[in-house]
Image (tube, grey):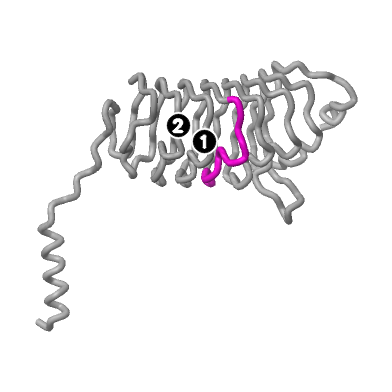
Amino acid sequence: MDPPALCVLQTLLVLTLLPPVAPAPCPRPCSCPQPTELHCTFRSLPTIPAAVPRHVERMNLFNSINKITDKSLAGLRKLELLMVHGNDIHDLPDGAFRDLTSLQMLKLSYNKLKEINRHTLQGLWSLARLHLDHNRLEFIHPDSFQGLTSLRLLQLEGNQLQQLHPATFTTFTLMGHFHVSTLKHLYLSDNGLTSLPSRLVATMPQLENLYLHGNPWTCDCNMRWFHDW
């Protein structure tokens, strides 16, 4: 046998004899019904557990979490579903989701968030469903959803929004001028909205469902466009 072939054979033999790599342990006090799932519900946790395995794809954190840092979710590039609803989160730091490039669904319902700023959602390029309902949102930056071109469903009902910028739901901009949203389902019910800018809906060519009940609408000339729409 020639030397190169012998070298390859020896390498394969060594790899065969090596013990299998053990999966990362499930962080206490959570449970992991499958290697790619992490459940930490009803554990009275004030923060996201440390050392979450990098291969986790689904994570449920219904708890008492009051703080998310810019490192809490670092490295979780395979995460596809994140449920952080029913906690006590007041704000989200810039970069908190920067590594979650595979995330498709984010549920932040029933927290105490007051605003979504320009960089809050940075990194969520695969996100299709975003649940921000029943928080205390008063402000959403017009560039908050820029780059989220996979976003199809946005839930914002049960907040304290009183006005919206015409470009609020824009997910990408053509030639730096034409604002376009990829949203199909938008929930704005039970806020404090009295009117909507006409250009808001014009940016959403794919919109199928728009929920607006429970707002104190002012029916004047500023809303005539809505009747025509």
Q: Dot 1 surroundings within 10 Å: few (below 14), some, or many (20 or more)?
A: some
Location of residue 146 by image quarter: top right
What residue do we see at 60% from left, 21% from top?
A: 136
Q: Answer whether residue 122 is magenta in the image.
A: yes
Q: Residue 22, percent across and down? A: 19, 45
Q: Which residue is mark 2?
A: 68
Q: Dot 2 surroundings within 10 Å: few (below 14), some, or many (20 or more)?
A: some
What residue do we see at 69% from left, 38% from top?
A: 142
Q: Mark 1–mark 2 contact, CB under 8 Å? A: yes
20 sits to left or right of 206: left
| Image: magenta residue range | 114-126
Quadrant (top left, top right, bottom left, bottom right) of the N terminus = bottom left
What residue do we see at 26% from left, 34% from top?
A: 26
Q: Residue 3, percent across and down? A: 13, 81
Q: Which mark is residue 49?
A: none
Q: Which residue is mark 1?
A: 93
Residue nearest the observer in this picture, 56 or 184: 56
- Magenta highlight: main SS: loop
Tell me the kind of residue under disc 2.
Ile
127 sits to left or right of 193: left
147 in relation to 83, above or below: below
